[in-house]
Image (cartoon, helix red, strand yellow):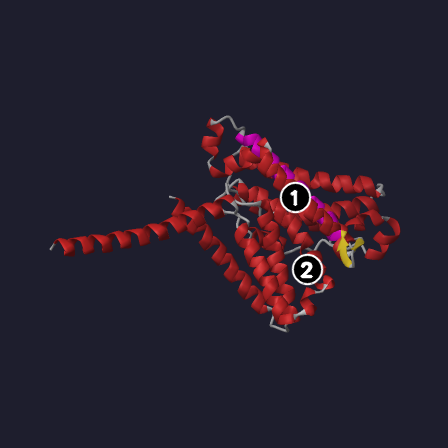
Amino acid sequence: MSDGHESAATAADTVAEFHDSRRGFARRLQHTLHVTPSLVPLIVLLSAVVGFSLLLGERFLSPFALTLILQQVQIIGIVALAQSLVILTAGIDLSVGAVMVLSSVVMGQFTFRYGLPPQIAVLCGLACGALCGLISGMLVAIVRLPPFIVTLGMWQVVLATNFLYSRNETIRAQDIEANAPILQFFGERVDIGGAIFTNGVIFMLILALVLAYALRFTAWGRHVYAVGDDPEAAGLSGVNVRRTLISVYVLAGTICAFAGWALIGRIGSVSPTSGQLANIESITAVVIGGISLFGGRGSILGALFGALIVGVFTLGLRLAGADPQWTNLLIGMLIIAAVAVDQWIRRVSV
């Protein structure tokens, strides 16, 4: 009988150890993903690059193809960085695309309609983006309106202002090139070791590194995460929640204005109808990049990886001759998977 009890106890201990090991692995994995939130999108990005490289060979691995991906995602990448800041505070900004386009229109119209020096017109466009962010930030932080409602309204207001002010007129690339080439500054190309980059791509990469450093190593960055995680607790610990929120929206608006400047360089002209899908595409990049829609967790580099993932799938499937709808299908699946992973991390961490 004693042998039977001992064998049963041993079996029970073995089962317990098995469950503990599984539980321990899940805890370690959750902790790793929590500490390094950009790890999942980085793995997906590298896997996609390797997969398309094996499928397409040199057509995909060429410096031209890889730099083309960066050029294609530079606008959405910059806007996604702005969107990331807002989402880290547990908000969302549906007006980023409209602010981007309005800022570019201001730069063009101030130059060609009013005859201002292009440098001054660029500064006015950047100020326009900052002002839009300031209005949204004050409504969210001071009036305490929901970010979704505020930015949904701002999207409509800014979009209407864009068309009314520009009179739906496009400023041609030839006119810009001849009279205000600084407006196309971000479209200028730089040859680095046979790879062709644009100033817009270089700006996107530098901006991502600067924001990553600021969020991780400065008091302002810690306040942003604290506000997104629990604004009431952040306020009790001495964080000025209102000031932090307003600063985030102003900075996001300014970054969108830079995206508008880069948009002129990308398409060559000033068009009030461009960038119509920037809102959705920026949110897509942020979600795929592992930044939690609930705020307080994520890496700014993850948003950049998310934008690159979209670019890799788009170019890879195009080179493979696949129907463009496959890109939408895969991106949609990645969005759902990213949110599922975020929810799983939250459940395991409880």
Q: Would you name the residue on which mark 1 appears?
A: 209
Horizontally, residue 19 falls left or right of residue 80, namely: left
Callout 1 crowding tier (Cα within 10 Å): few <14, some 14–19, many ≥20: some
Task: Tell me what residue is drawn at x 54 percent, y 33 percent.
Answer: 223
Relative image position of residue 155 (x, y in whole percent): 61, 47
Callout 2 crowding tier (Cα within 10 Å): few <14, some 14–19, many ≥20: many
Q: Which residue type does callout 2 highlight?
A: Ile
Q: Quadrant of the N terminus?
A: bottom left
Asked if residue 258 is positioned above or below residue 58 in the image, the reply reads above
Relative image position of residue 249 (x, y in whole percent): 60, 39
Q: Nearer the viewer, residue 51 or 178?
A: 51
Is residue 142 in the magenta section? no
Horizontally, residue 1 falls left or right of residue 316, namely: left
How many callouts does the rendering have?
Answer: 2
Relative image position of residue 76 (x, y in whole percent): 65, 53
Q: Quadrant of residue 314?
A: bottom right
User: Residue 69 bears which disc, if any?
Assistant: 2
Q: Secondary structure at mark 2?
A: helix
Relative image position of residue 117 (x, y in whole percent): 85, 41
Q: Nearer the viewer, residue 99 or 286?
A: 286
Q: Quadrant of residue 311?
A: bottom right
Task: Tell me what residue is drawn at x 59 percent, y 45 percent.
Answer: 300
Residue 13 shows up from this direction: yes
Q: Which residue type does callout 1 highlight?
A: Leu
Q: Main secondary structure of the magenta part?
A: helix
Separation of residues labelled 1 and 2 (CA atoms): 19 Å
Horizontally, residue 31 falls left or right of residue 117, namely: left
**Span highlighted in magenta in the image:** 241-264
